[in-house]
Every structure is written in structure tokens, then in C-alpha cells.
Amino acid sequence: MRALTVRPGTSGSVEVTDVPEPAAADGHLLVDGLAVGVCGTDKEIASGDYGWAPPGEDRLVLGHESLGRVREAPDGSGFSPGDLVVGVVRRPDPVPCGACAHGQFDMCRNGRYTERGIKALDGYASERWTVEPGYAVKLDPRLADVGMLLEPTTVVAKAWDEVEHIGRRSWFEPHRVLVTGAGPIGLLAALLGVQRGLDVHVLDQVGDGPKPELVRDLGATYHSDGLDAALRAAGEPDVVIEATGVAPLVVGAMSATAPYGIVCLTGVSSRGRTVKLDAGGVNRDLVLENDVVFGSVNANLHHYELGAEALAKADVDWLQRLVSRRVPVERFAEAFEAQPEDVKVILTLAQ
Ligand code: BGC
């Protein structure tokens, strides 16, 4: 069967290759792959900067933003043929560390976790794949065209869950949220903010294309004149979800909040991006306002449930509009090449 594979560490090594059919062993589900989303991490792996093949292999099957349909399910697995499913990305480290032992593999402390399509486990970009029922999430059948958005949604479901946890350390009734970046993560963060009844503002660079309208159709406000102008127009946010990883914005966001502000950083930036920073001023603001800045990555099963609930309540037409292009896997190179109007590009797997 066909799979999209890469030789990790080697730029330009992505290819559609023939790989052995998976056998549904050990109580696993056998799934027909429908599509995978392409994200920044996939591009980093494709350019040789990230990613690890499974032990003893030299190629890795790509794809961690999965969507498939169950073909075979063992009795008692809780799944049936025809169910729409998404496979979880991360697996606990083998030790396991305390967090992994508690099912919080997204918070792994020793870094020995594995990730399908990223780190030492084959991903989901193949015509068929298997998954442990305990690491599969059933989706509302209405999400058949957009379910590959679950994985990025889990990232923001976790971010919001953590914001609320941190907020509960004192009286917390947030009103205004600023999301920096209107890519898939930013737009999905905005969706979850609107679902919470918050006054959501989204800041991006572009003034045209699909993003302004996607934000407005959510009932949120779009800004494209920079952080200072957005703050002047909107007022100080109680919560910031940073989804660009752009150094000046990250630093700007830290000082932008109302007192008791919470800033969640989700953007994976490159090292070596230096900015001039009034570190004393940033520290002073954080201390005097009881502010919190924290980083967040990946998601555990609880966040997959939260993400699946959020997508099930969302307007499917709006979710469809996040998918800018659907590219057959054979033409993967087109999907890896960004186009100006792209939000989320997906690769389709079924023939
Ligand atoms: C994925 C996360 C993963 C991270 C680091 C992201 O693209 O969404 O699940 O943990 O990359 O590998």
C-alpha cells in the first residue's frame, strides 16, 4: 500500500513509497486512512530539521493530524466498522516518568515519549493504519470532511484547559482574549474562545484573503495593524493565546495583558531569534500584575475529548473553510509549498 514517508534528517527525502499492509494485531483497530493535515512540524521534518524513524528503520511514515474510517474493530473495543476515527499522536515514555504514568504524556518529564509521524513511530499518512483503541478517538459523523482538524484542536483545547486551571488560583472571570496569529491554531483557539462566550480578538499580518472573514464569521474581531494598534482598539486582554512563535510578538504579548493576565505560548519558533527587550520592565509587569506566561505543547486523551466536543458543536461549514486545499497524497510537494491564501492544507489518502 502507499504511504508518505521520509528519511528523517535528510532534506528532500519525502516520497510516496510502497510499504507492507498493516495487520490488525493485539486488539488494534484497522483503519482506512482518509486524510492527514500538513503543519509546520511536517515541514520541519521534510526539510531534515526534526523527526526520528522507528528503531531499526531508516524511513518514517509521516502524518500526525489523522482522519480515518474503521475497517476492522475487535469485539469489546468500543469501535465498529464505519466509525470515523482520529489516532492520538503521542505515547508515554517507557520508563514511565510520573506524568506519563498518570496519563499525562503531553507533560512527559524525561523527553523519551514517542509520537506517531514525528518521533520513532510511523504516522498516519498511509492508505491503512492500525491504532490501539485506547489511543483512538471517535468523531461525530458530521465531521467526515474536517475531522483531520481534531489534532490541532486538541492543542488549543489543552491551552484553554490550562488557562482555566491557572485562572482558578484566584478569582477569575476573563472577558477579553487576544489570539496572535490566524493560522489553524490561532483560528481554532479563537473558535474555542467564542464557544466560551468571550470577546475574542485575533491579530495577524494579512489584511485580505480568507482570514479576516473567517474571524468575523465566528463573531470575533480581526486586527492586522500590529500589536499596539490591536491593543489600543480592543483594550488589554485577560488572556492571550500566542500562536505565531514570532519573537517580538511573543515578548509584546507578555506585557500586553490586563492585571492577572494569562499568556499561553503555543508557537514553536526557531532558536536564535534575538530581540531587544526591557527585561526589567517585563519582569516588573509580571510581578506587579500577578501575570502568568506559560508554554504548552501536544495533548493527552482528556484534551482529545475536549477537542472532539468543541468540533462537534462548531459550524461544519466554517470548519470546511479552514481547509484551503485538498491535495492527493501523490502530489504531496504541492501541499508542502505554502500559498498565500492557505489556512490548512490536507493530503487525501483514499484513491
Ligand atoms: C504536534 C504535537 C507535537 C509537537 C512536537 C506538533 O506539531 O501537534 O502533537 O507534540 O509537534 O513534536
Image (cartoon, rainbow, N blue to C red):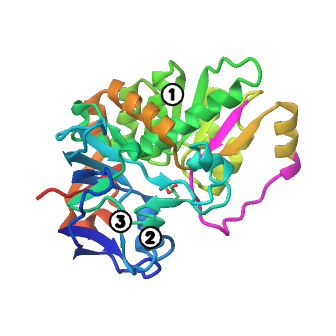
Residue nearer the viewer, 299 or 347? 299
Q: Pointer 2: what residue?
A: 45
Q: Are marks 1 and 3 in contact (CB under 8 Å)?
A: no
Residue nearer the viewer, 175 or 206? 175
Amino acid marked by disc 3: Leu
Q: Earlier in the sequence, mark 2 or mark 3?
A: 2
Which quadrant would residue 136 be assigned to in this image?
Answer: top left
Q: Earlier in the sequence, mark 1 or mark 2?
A: 2
Q: Pointer 1: what residue?
A: 193
Which quadrant would residue 195 be assigned to in this image?
Answer: top left
Where is residue 20? Give x, y as percent.
22, 72
Disc 1 versus disc 3: nearer the observer: 3
Q: Pointer 3: what residue?
A: 62
Gap in Å between the C-alphas at discs 1 and 3? Answer: 31 Å
Residue nearer the viewer, 22 or 324? 22
Where is residue 2? Give x, y as percent.
19, 69
Q: Which residues are magenta?
A: 261-280
Amino acid marked by disc 1: Gly
Q: Are marks 2 and 3 in contact (CB under 8 Å)?
A: yes
Amino acid marked by disc 2: Ile
Q: Earlier in the sequence, mark 1 or mark 3?
A: 3
The answer to whether residue 68 is visible is yes
Rate crowding at label 1 as few (under 14), some (14 to 19) or many (20 or more) other CA atoms within 10 Å: many
Where is residue 74? Give x, y as percent.
25, 44
